[in-house]
Image (cartoon, helix red, strand yellow):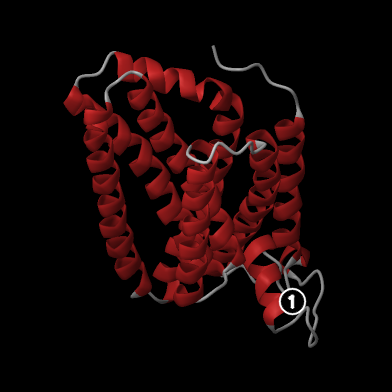
Amino acid sequence: MTSSFLITLREGLEASLIVAILLTYLSKTNRKQDARYVWIGTASAVLACLVAGTAIYLAVSGLNGKVEMAVEGTIALVAAAVLTQMIFWMRKNSQQLSAELRAKVDKSAKTALFTIAFVAVVREGLETVLFLLSAETSSASGASVVLGGLVGLAAAVILGVAIFAGGRKVNLKQFFNVTAVLLIMFAAGLAGKAVHEYRELIGWENGWLVQPAWDIKNGMWASGTFYDFMKGFFGWHYAAENIRVITYFAFLLPTLYFYRKPVKSAA
């Protein structure tokens, strides 16, 4: 639930900010009457994501055996890659996002506003579908993932409204930096999950790499609410094999290093 909350909070806030920027700029340029095209584009994107998410979930949930291993491993690997790419893209382009959107609005006809809003929101929405699906397959039940996702989405909308309509000053850079680090840790867990699924898929059961790095039989690190939190958010497992642990840190440490390394803003 925690991982899905964080995912929809961040992705939902990004989408909310994009919509808010469009609406605010239309208002300031005396084009309030065109706001309906933004809302229609946003609503259409949300509907498209719900349909796509439901269809994908129904298709995946009926799988079992080696097919399930292959699909879950692939979903986890793709989600880790897309999530990491999204984090670095947002870090590089966040400062220019508002200006770029305003420039597009200036050049856009009314119907094009629909496209701008639709593409912006559907991109965030489809990413969210992928991340939530990986969260469900890797740790928690579908119900807990949906609940956490809905709470995170509601919080994102409220925060987005507060920033632009309420005039509150929120340090977005700090918010995105903190959530980026947490999501990088989540992505590292997905990478480890992918390796685990592929190992089981090919039947690799011998050697030091597939031996457990630890084997905790009981206690909060082996079961219960805390265990579910650690498993869902950080990819923890009570008997994680060595190759899974190595993959986790091989993904985590370089990614954190490059994220903290200064980069030039997009032109």
Left or right: 6 as drawn, with respect to 71: right
- Give the residue drawn at x 75%, y 27%: 261
Quarter holding the N terminus?
bottom right
- Give the residue drawn at x 43%, y 30%: 21
| Location of residue 157 in the rendering, given as x and y in whole percent from the top left corner | 46, 50
| Location of residue 257 in the rendering, given as x and y in whole percent from the top left corner | 77, 35
- Which is more toward the observer, 221 or 69? 221
Q: Residues within 10 Å of mark 1 (few under 14, many from 20)?
A: some
Left or right: 155 as drawn, with respect to 189: left
- Give the residue drawn at x 22%, y 37%: 36
| Location of residue 236 in the rendering, given as x and y in whole percent from the top left corner | 71, 67
- Which is more toward the observer, 65 or 166? 166
Residue named by callout 1: 238
Note whether 218 is above or below 54 in the view shown: below
- Which is more toward the observer, 241 or 156? 156
Find numbered disc 1 in the image and state the secondary structure of the residue it sits on: loop
Note whether 34 is above or below 184 in the view shown: above
Q: Quadrant of residue 146?
A: bottom left
- Which is more toward the observer, 116 or 204? 116
| Location of residue 79 in the rendering, given as x and y in whole percent from the top left corner | 50, 51
- Give the residue drawn at x 28%, y 56%: 52
* Residue placed furthest toward the bottom: 218
